[in-house]
Every structure is written in structure tokens, then in C-alpha cells.
Image: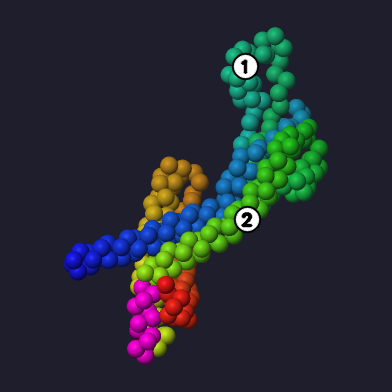
Amino acid sequence: MSSSFDNFQKRRLISSYFSVVLSVFLVLFLLGILGLFIINSKKLANDFKENIAMTVFFKNEANDSIVKAFGTQIKASPFVKSYTYVTKEAAAKEHTDIIGEDFMEFLGENPLQNSYDIHLKGDYVIKDSITKIEAGLRKNTMISDIVYDKQLVNLVNDNIKKVSMWILIISGFLAVIAVLLINSSLRLSIHSNRFIIKTMQMVGATKAFIRKPFVMRSIKLGMIGAVLAVLALIGVLIYVETSFPNLGILEDKAMIGLVLLAVLGIGVLITWLSTYFATQRFLNLRTDDLY
């Protein structure tokens, strides 16, 4: 009978430990994913904005030296990410491939112009900056027109602001849930030992002495959950880098390392604080209240 009861207690204890580790792992994994997304959100936003091209068209009287000089100018410009020179012949061929017929046959000439497709750095793809850049380029009298999707630029920046705001809200919400879930799991674990805590207190053990083994055990469980979360996050990073190498998600190793260390630190901190206050609660209860 005693052996059967002991086995039941062991199973219940193991189940309690497992629930704590699982809670810590799931919560820290989600927080870690959110942290990685936040540190890469600017890179993702810039990657999208840098795909928006600004096309600069030259007048027909602009000779090769003028066009090449413009290329040298924008190459040295701090706002240029990349650029491509497109001759009017190459543009005509591209249009022919798109529409499926040679439009020059019935026009008799090529109406297109030599141009540069300029991709700006993400930080400059905002309304004020791009307007100043456009105004500066238009000072060149050999430029006939500058074309880019103004509505798309405004839409992208507005949506990035909205997404950033929601990320902050979700981060705060998840942080609260993380504390509550882990705290709840640890309190349930300690609740099953409330009679042992009170018995130790009644025979003269100090609060610090009683609290120490519970805190150390919880920290160990928190570390296990945190390490599992870190390993899972590393797996996600490797998968994303392999599947989407253009994102360069592993470039900022310092920030990634900081997020992973933060996950470990949060795992230890939350389990320590939750266990401290949970044991303190049972230490302060009267014996009659334990039932």
C-alpha cells in the first residue's frame, strides 16, 4: 500500500516538473521568436523598401559621357543601395517580351529613353527623404523625368508604423502571460508540498532554509526549459537562413546572441521570483488555512 502511494507521489511529482518545464519552454520560445522578429523587423522592412525602384529617364540629347557621369555621381551617393543602367534598346526588348509583339514595327522608331533604375537604401525610402533626393536629381537639366510609386512608398511606411505599434503591444501582452503561466505552474508545484513546508517551519527551520531547495529546484527546471527554448530558436534560425538566404537573418550575431541570453536570463529570473513569492505565501499561512 505504501509502495503504491509512493509511486503515485513520484508520478505526480514528475508530472508537476514536466508541466513547469513545458510552460517555461513554450513561453520563452514564443518570447524568443518575438524578440528575433523585433531585431530583424527593420531589416525586413528595409529589404522590402529597397525593392522599390526609382527610374530616372534622360533626354534623347544626353550623350554617353553625360549618362556615365550621372552613373559616377549616384555611385558615390550615400542614399543609393544599387543601380542599373538600362539603354533604350534594352528597354524596348523588355517591352517587346512583355507584350509579345514588336511595337517599333508600327511606330517606326524607338520612343523609349535611356534610364537608370535606382534602388535607394531603406532608411531613405520615406516621403521627406525621397522628395529631397528627387528634387536634387531634377537639377540635372539632361533628366527628362523621374518616376517611382509614391503611393506605395507612403503605404509601406504607414503599414510599418502600424506593425511596429502592434508588435510592442503583443510583446507586452506576451510578457504578462509568460509571468502568469510560469508563476501558476510553479505555485501548483509548490502547493503539493505545502504540508512539508509548514512541518519544517514548525520544527524551527528558518524561512530562508525552507525556501532554498524549492528555489534551487525551480531554477534548475527554468534552466532546462530555457535551454530547450534556445535550442528550438537556433533550429528556427538555421531553417529560416537555409530557406531564405537573402534575408541574411544570421548577420547580426551579436543581437541574436543577446536575445538567446535574454531567454536564459528570463527563464531563471521568472522561476526564481515566482518560487520565492509562492513559498513565502505558504510560509505565512496559518496551519488551518492549509486545508
Q: Nearer the viewer, mark 2 or mark 1?
A: 2
Which of 205 and 260 lies nearest the eye of the viewer? 205
**Quadrant of residue 54 in the image?**
top right
Looking at the rendered image, the quarter that the N terminus falls into is: bottom left
Q: Horizontal and vertical percent for residue 167?
A: 60, 53
Q: How is the image coloured?
A: rainbow
| Residue 84 falls in image quadrant | top right
Q: Nearer the viewer, residue 32 or 172?
A: 172
* 261 drawn magenta: no
Residue 169: give its label: 2
User: Residue 60 at x, y = what percent?
Assistant: 75, 27
> Which residue is found at the position 66% from the left and 25% from the top?
88
For the C terminus, the image quarter is bottom left
Q: Residues within 10 Å of mark 1 (few under 14, many from 20)?
A: few
Give the prevailing secondary structure in the magenta stretch. Answer: helix
**Residue under pointer 1:** 99
Is residue 282 shown to the viewer in this render? Answer: no
Q: Residue at x 63, y 34 (%)?
A: 85
Q: Position of residue 193 (x, y in %)?
A: 36, 73
Cα separation, mark 2 vs mark 1, equals 47 Å
Q: Answer above or below: position of 24 versus 51.
A: below
Question: Closer to the N terminus: mark 2 or mark 1?
Answer: 1
- Residue 101 image position (x, y, % from top left): 61, 12
Amino acid type at mark 2: Ile
Q: Which mark is residue 20?
A: none
User: Where are the magenta residues, as a range?
Assistant: 193-205
Q: Residues within 10 Å of mark 2 (few under 14, many from 20)?
A: few
Residue at horizontal 48%, vertical 54%? 30
Query: Which residue is depicted at the point 68% across and 50% down?
Result: 161
Q: Is 203 included in the stretch rendered in magenta?
A: yes
Q: Secondary structure at mark 2?
A: helix
Q: Say which quarter of the image contains residue 282.
A: bottom left
